[in-house]
Amino acid sequence: MGGLLPSLSRPANHSRIFYSVMFDAGSTGTRIHVYTFIHGGSEELPVLDNEMFHSIKPGLSAYADSPEMAGHTVRMLLKVAKKTVPRLEWKRTPLFLRATAGLRLLSAERARLLLEQVQHVFDESPFLVPDDSVSIMNGTNEGILAWISVNYLTGHLNAHSERTVGILDLGGGSTQITFLPKLRKTIESVPVADYVAKYDISNSTFELYTYSYLGNGLMAARLATLGALGAEGLEWRVFKSSCLPKKFRDEWSFGGLTYRVSGDPDGLAGYKLCYQEVLKVVKGIIHQPHELQDSNVFYAFSYYFDRAVDAGLIDGVQGGTLEVRDFKKRAKEVCNKMTKHPPHPFFPVHGHDLHHLSAQGWIRLQGEHRAAVDQESEQRGGQLGFRRHVGSPPRPEDL
Ligand SMILES: Nc1ncnc2c1ncn2[C@@H]1O[C@H](COP(=O)(O)OP(=O)(O)O)[C@@H](O)[C@H]1O
């Protein structure tokens, strides 16, 4: 992301303020971040002074059959940039868009057509469009950038810090886990080499354990649990799950497709059956690093945060600290209550999952991580790790 910042050198009489526009094209929504930076001294990094944020649902992948609508989404969001950045600065303010799991899940050709529309909207805008302005970010970079951002913002990357924290990011289409292993064995025993990535920051090299599970984001995994992922006959089929109250019936959309879902009216519902259903989706896929059996501190965000707020486990403004077993305990309580009093708080099937505006936007997960992975799926991100006046990541307003 180094290209996000224009060159640090500038003419002596030039404004100390400059801007940069970043689009996060996620599987469940497209978000614009308009950053205002102040140049530091010639040797120093710029300081992030302000951020303007706006988002639109659904994500670009919902328009795989009508790519011009993806262009329209980006054009709408660019209005925020035009309002925020003074007109005189437009032509030196760069635009970037990075797409995540929604586009990774599409065929290369369908993704290309969507990005082509975005590129077209960028090119006809009055802003600066650098090379490689529009692309799909791979899962490894997504995980690493989240790790850097969280460790930067929590002060773990400064010279005096001895340790770092791991990150768990649960998106709609993919989920990421990234941490700095304490044991050499963790690196040596990864299932495949691409679980390890080296990253250089301020004279240190970090060898990180990082992996992005495509198809195991909250929404994609939910579809897999329903047996609906890639299924045909969506017009007439109803996908049943024992994770839903028996009499529950509704429609649910993700990635541009609408699914009819229901509980199993003739079957059973509740924690145990639901757990078995979900286990089938993650078993044999999720790698469980041995060293995480011990106590570890992870920062969990995105849908981990949203679900923890919805389930009443943490405060939507303060965030909080949880152990993985707290999720399990709450899931049991809610699922078993659901069987008695339908419908549905823990498995919201409407597209508009509750969003709670928060200053923190993450939870600290500590305790036995491995236990968690047995019960629930893991892990992602995308904050930028520059010096900020406030040490917390931005939160979406209407996701
Ligand atoms: N700037 C942000 N800060 C914190 N959480 C965010 C931010 N932008 C999106 N999210 C969270 O990310 C989740 C959606 O992930 P999304 O990007 O759509 O999926 P994917 O990464 O799989 O493409 C939601 O929980 C949303 O609240």
Image (cartoon, grey):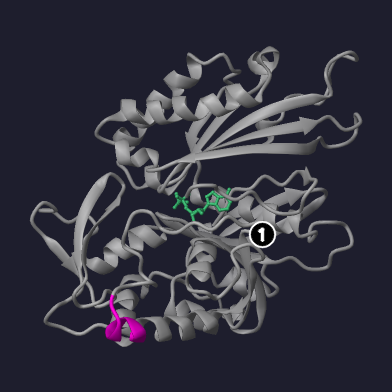
At 57% from the left and 79% from the top, the residue drawn is 369
- Residue that mark 1 sits on: 360
At 74% from the left and 55% from the top, the residue drawn is 153
At 66% from the left and 29% from the top, the residue drawn is 20
Q: Which quadrant would residue 333 be assigned to in this image?
A: bottom left
205 w.r.t. 44: above or below: below
Front position in the image: 355 or 130:
355
Q: Main secondary structure of the magenta part?
A: helix
Residue 384 appears anywhere in the view: yes
Quarter of the N terminus within the rendering: top right
310 w.r.t. 92: above or below: below
Q: Position of residue 84 (x, y in %)?
A: 64, 26
Q: Position of residue 297 (x, y in %)?
A: 67, 73
In the picture, measured across the screen, residue 220 lies left or right of residue 176, that is left
Residue 216 appears anywhere in the view: no
Front position in the image: 278 or 34:
34
151 w.r.t. 45: above or below: below
Amino acid type assigned to the residue bearing label 1 in the image:
Gln
Mark 1 Cα shell of 10 Å, populated few (<14), some (14-19), many (≥20): some
173 w.r.t. 369: above or below: above
At 77% from the left and 37% from the top, the residue drawn is 49
Front position in the image: 164 or 210:
164
In the picture, measured across the screen, residue 120 lies left or right of residue 292, that is left
Quick check: is 45 in the magenta stretch? Answer: no
Q: Which quadrant would residue 184 be assigned to in this image?
A: bottom right
Q: Position of residue 3 (x, y in %)?
A: 66, 30
Label 1 sits on a secondary structure element that is loop
Write down the region rendered in magenta.
336-342
Question: Which residue of the protein is positioned furthest toward the left in this rendering?
Answer: 236
